[in-house]
Image (tube, rainbow, N blue to C red):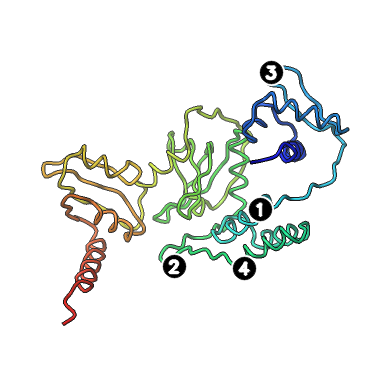
Amino acid sequence: MYSPTTRLLTVLELLQSYKQMSGPEIARRLEIDVRTVRRYIVSLQDMGIPVEAERGPYGAYQLQRGNRLPPLMFTDAEAVAITLGLLAIREFRFPVDVTAVEGALAKTERALPEKPLAQVRGLQEAITFNIGSHFTPPALQQSEFVVTLSGAAQRRQRVHMSYRAWNGDVSERDFDPYGIVFNEGYWYTAGYCHLRQGLRTFRLDRVTALELRDETFEHPDDFDPLDHVLRSIGFVPETHQVEVLLKTTLEHASEVIPPVLGALESADEGVIFRRSASQLQWVAHVLMDLDFPVVVRQPQELRDILRRLATKALDMISDPA
């Protein structure tokens, strides 16, 4: 439960961090109503802090230009949140220079009193992230692409992209980035491709060059980047093309296999499941969990994985004698 003083200081932090913020936006972030936000603003003004307010139901608040306030101390919860965030950024290979992460951790420690400092150091010493050796996504060679594309998406600014496809082909295209998605170790961008004249998804580790254009674009209000990426990556050519016969009805298959995993198609013998995959181990486990007969048509590598799993399972239940 946050105290009114903590919320008041958080309002001040937001105003220092952003050029201006509307009352509804502050209310949404702090999970309070707009009337309470106005009371906090009045309290800050009564304390002599130069907060300017625009009139109207959706007026914005901002600090007067030229006024610099001393930095605020982190609360215990804020120190923990910052530390965990920085550790996750480092371990999950986010496109940030590791020296910048270490520098931010060091500066955070210098700003902390003894109690939160002990908590922060305890987090760093005790927590271990298990990323998994069987799945190591490639690191971004150009980590600034995330910053460039996110800025372009915010400004609705077109970019020119050089892209290397899964088969090595390199192409050039103008692209309207609608958003960026981090999914299972990979970074993606989704938006409108002017070369293909339609919505497309691109993996950022395959982008070789980016250049901002002067043109702008309109962002569709109903476009969901995460939903589009999840639906797209199931059909992007990868190392293996999976085709499986599911001996059940299309209705039952649709209940247990979501669209993001692949395409389902009715057939005389049941339902055909198709998708592409660079990693087959998880596909094998998904198939083994299904409650109806399954026949793997391709690839051979998926059959081999299932055969090894079956042999291992039989060994586990064999008579020790």
Q: Measure the alpha-carbon separation of dots 4 and 2.
A: 22 Å
Tell me the element at label 2: loop
**Residue type of the residue flagged with mark 2:** Ser
* Tag 1 residue: 82
- Which residue shows up at 74% across the image and 25% down it? 38
In the rendering, at what x and y percent does residue 146 appear? 58, 48
- Which residue shows up at 64% across the image and 30% down it? 32
In the rendering, at what x and y percent does residue 227 appear? 43, 39
- The answer to whether 196 appears left or right of 320 in the picture is right
Report the front residue among 183 and 127: 127
| Res 101 quadrant in image | bottom right
Nearest to viewer (mark 1 / mark 2): 1
Q: Measure the alpha-carbon separation of dots 1 and 2.
A: 27 Å
Q: Measure the alpha-carbon separation of dots 1 and 4.
A: 15 Å
- The answer to whether 238 appears left or right of 26 in the picture is left
Within 10 Å of disc 4 (Cα), the crowding (few <14, some 14-19, many 20+) is: few
**Residue type of the residue flagged with mark 4:** Glu
* Tag 4 residue: 125
- The answer to whether 69 appears left or right of 141 in the picture is right
In the rendering, at what x and y percent does residue 240 appear? 31, 57
Q: Measure the alpha-carbon separation of dots 3 and 1.
A: 34 Å
Nearest to viewer (mark 2 / mark 3): 3
